[in-house]
Amino acid sequence: MKNQLEQLTGKQLAEVDRQFSLYSSGAVEIIPEEELKHKIAKSVLIKKPLKIKLGLDPSAPDVHLGHTVVLNKLRQFQDNGHVIQLIIGDFTGKIGDPTGKSIARKQLTNEEVQHNAQTYFQQFSKVIQMEEVELHYNSKWHSKLHFEDVINLAGKITVARLMERDDFEERLALKKPISLHEFFYPLMQGYDSVILENDIELGGTDQHFNILMGRHFQEKFGKEKQVAILMPLLEGLDGVEKMSKSKNNYIGIDELPNNIYGKAMSIPDELMLKYFELVTDFSPDQIQTLQHDLKNNILHPRDAKMLLGRTIVRMYHDQQAAEEAELRFKSIFQKRELPTDIPTVHWQGSRSITVIDLLIVLDLLGSKSEARRMIQNGGIKMNGEKILDIHAVIIIADDLIIQVGKRIYRKLKCN
Amino acid sequence: MKNQLEQLTGKQLAEVDRQFSLYSSGAVEIIPEEELKHKIAKSVLIKKPLKIKLGLDPSAPDVHLGHTVVLNKLRQFQDNGHVIQLIIGDFTGKIGDPTGKSIARKQLTNEEVQHNAQTYFQQFSKVIQMEEVELHYNSKWHSKLHFEDVINLAGKITVARLMERDDFEERLALKKPISLHEFFYPLMQGYDSVILENDIELGGTDQHFNILMGRHFQEKFGKEKQVAILMPLLEGLDGVEKMSKSKNNYIGIDELPNNIYGKAMSIPDELMLKYFELVTDFSPDQIQTLQHDLKNNILHPRDAKMLLGRTIVRMYHDQQAAEEAELRFKSIFQKRELPTDIPTVHWQGSRSITVIDLLIVLDLLGSKSEARRMIQNGGIKMNGEKILDIHAVIIIADDLIIQVGKRIYRKLKCN
C-alpha cells in the first residue's frame, strides 16, 4: 500500500491532495494521517469508494447542531463518491443497563429502536443523501454471538488497554466502581468495524478511545485498519458544556425557524466563529473574511450573530424562513429598546427565589411592602414580561433582565 | 434461618455439632463458619441433604494424593447422606486459550473431555461412592449463553473486585498483560454455582477467590449463598511445592503398589504427620498418638514412614499389596545395608552433570583418570546402581546416594 502514491499520475495526485485537505479541514486529529492519504490514493487509483463509518446511539434521536459537525464531514465524503455506513447501536440499547443503575440506559424495544432510527434518518436527510447511505443495526451480528465468541473477542484485548480510557482510569483512581460489562461497549464498537470492514470511522474527540478500538480489533481479526477522524466537540449555547439534549443547551435541526434563530442569538460572542466553521456551509475563505471584519470593527458582533442565525435557519429551512425569523426577532427583542448599558450582577444565590426576595436581595427596592406594591402596579418585568403575582417564584437564568419601573435595569450573570 | 438452631432438640443439636466439627477438621478456612452451622442445622431439621460442589479441570485427569485432600472431605459429607456435585469445567477446556499463548490450555475435543472425565471418575471411585454423585458438564449451560446474557453476568461484578485476585493484582503491578477473557474464568465458576444451587463449595486454598465468586453470583441472582470450605494444599515429595503432575512430585492414586510405597518413603520427615492427617484414613486420635510417639522417640521416623507407605498402598490397593510392597522395599533398599551415618552434601550446582565431574567436584577421587578407572572397575554406584559408562550424565535428585568403592558414601541434599 505504501507505494500507491508513486503509481499516481500528476492529476490523480492533485485529486488525492484535494480530498485529503478537504477531509482534514476542521478535524482535531487524524489517526494516522499517512494512512488516510494512502486510503484516498488507493480509492482514486482503483476507483473504489471508501467506506466511512458513523455509530449512532439509538436512545437519543434528537439531532442537534452538535451532530452536524460530523454529518457535514460525512457529506464531504459523500460528495466525493464515498459510501457512508451508519450503524445504529441497537444491541446495547436493547440490553439496557444490567446493573439497573443508569436511568439514561433504559431498555429499548424493537419498535422504539426503529422509531428512533427513523427519527435520525429523517433529520439526517437535511445534511446527507440518505438514499445512498448503508444502514446497519449492530444487533444483527452481536445477537448471534455466543459465550464462546465473546471470550474469543475478549481474548484479543488486555485489561490494561481498556483501563486507559479516560473515564475508566479516573473512576479506578477515585475507587468508583466500574462494572465489568462496561468494558464491553468499546469492544462492541470495535467489533462493528470488524464486520463492516470500513476504511474510516468518524466521531467527536470524546470517541477517541472507542474509535481506536475499531483499529485494534480490525487488526486482530486480520483486516485492514480503519483511520480515525476526530472532530471537535461543539460547545452548547452556554458556551461551556458540550452541546447535548440533556444539558438543554442545544439547537435542534428540526426546531422551528424562530427557535433556531433566537437560540443562535444567545450564543456567546467568542464561539461565533467556531459555529461558522463547524455548523454552517461557509467556506474557509468566507470565515476568514468574517474573522478579519470582526477584528477590525468593520462588522458588529451583533450583526455577525444575526448572519449566523439566518444561515442556520436557511440551512435547515430556507432563505425566506431565515428572513422572517430575523424580522420577528427584531420586532420583539430589539424594539424593546433596552438601554445598552444595563449593569450586570453576578448571581451566586439560589436558582429559584420569590420575586419579592429577589428585588430585596438585589437592593432594587427598600422593603417588601414597597416591592409588593410595585408588583401589583405592574412595575416589575422579568425579560420583558410583567410579573403580577406577588408570590411568583423566579427561576434564575443567565442573562435574566430585571426591570423596575421605567429606568432601573439589572442583568444577571450566573457563571 | 438464624433461628434454626433454636428449633433443634438436644439430640439434633449434638448431631449438628458432630457434623460441623467433622467437616471443619483439617480445613484451613470456612467462609463463613456460622453459615455452615446453619446449613447443617437446616439439613438436620428438615432432613434434606446438602449439595456439595467440587469443580474439576478436564485437562489434567491424573488424580494424585493432592486431590484426595478434598476427596476425603467429600467422602465425609457423603457418609453423612449429603449429595456431591462434581462439575467438569469442559466449557473452558473446549474453548482453549483464545490468545494462543498458553500451551497448557490447549483446546479439547468432546471425546477428550469425556475420556478425561471417565479417567477422573474411575480414580475417584477409590475414595467416594461414584454411583451417588451428581455429574455435571458446565458446557451444558455456558454454551447456551448469548452475548446479552454474558453482559448481564458481567454487569453483576466490578472490575475492582476481579482485580483483587492475587495473580491479577500481581500481574497488573508488574505491568504484565491480563487478557480480558481471563476475567471470565472466575465468572464461569461463579455462574456454575448459580445453576447448581449448591450449599457448599470445596477447594484448596488456592481456590479462595474463585469459590467466593460462587457466593457473590448466587447472591446477585437471588439464591442462597454457598459456604466455602478451603482445604490445605498438600506439598509434594520435594516437601516444597504443591503436589502436581507438572512438578513431578506426586503420588498418583492409580500407581502400582511398589511405586506408591517407594515414593511415600521419600517424603521429608517433617511432612509425615501432615500426610497422615490429610491423605490417610487415620482418626485424629490415632494421629495424636503417632505425634506423641515420634516426639518421645518411642517410634522411629523410618518406621512411621513405613506405616504411612503401607497405609496409602492399603487405601488404593489392599492390605496384602501393602505388605508386599514393604517387603520388596526392604529387600532392595534396606538389605544394601547402607551405613547409618552417610555424610550429607548440600548440592548447589547444576542438576545434570557427568559422573566423572561429579566425583571430582565432590572431591571423592583425585583425578579424572582415577575416576575413569574406578567406573570401569564397577566401583561407582548411584542409589545402589553401578555406573559403568564413563560418559554417563547423572541427574541430581534429593537424597541421591553416591558410593565410591566399599566404604565411601555421600548423600546429596538439594534444598
Image (cartoon, coloured by chain):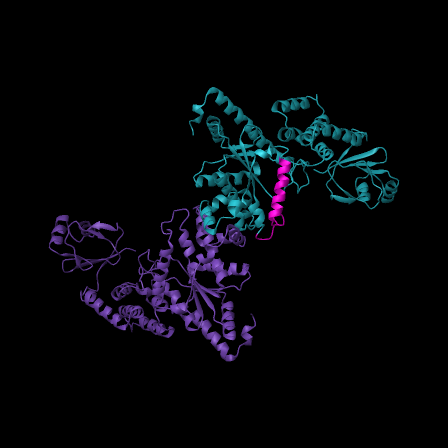
Chain colours: A purple, B cyan
The number of discs equals 0
Q: Is residue A352 above or below residue B399?
A: below
Taking the image as drawn, is residue A354 in sight? Answer: yes
A409, B349: nearer the viewer: B349
Quadrant in the rendering for residue B5: top left
Q: Is residue A355 above or below residue A53?
A: above
**Residue at screen point 50% across, 41% down:** B190
**Residue at screen point 88% across, 40% down:** B377
Left or right relative to A126: residue B43: right
Residue B100: give x, y in percent of width and height.
60, 53
Taking the image as drawn, is residue A59 in sight? Answer: no
B85, B298: nearer the viewer: B85
Q: The C terminus of chain A is located in which quarter?
A: bottom left
Q: The N terminus of chain A is located in which quarter?
A: bottom right
The magenta span reads B98-124
**Residue at screen point 48% across, 50% down:** B146
Residue B110 lies in the magenta stretch? yes
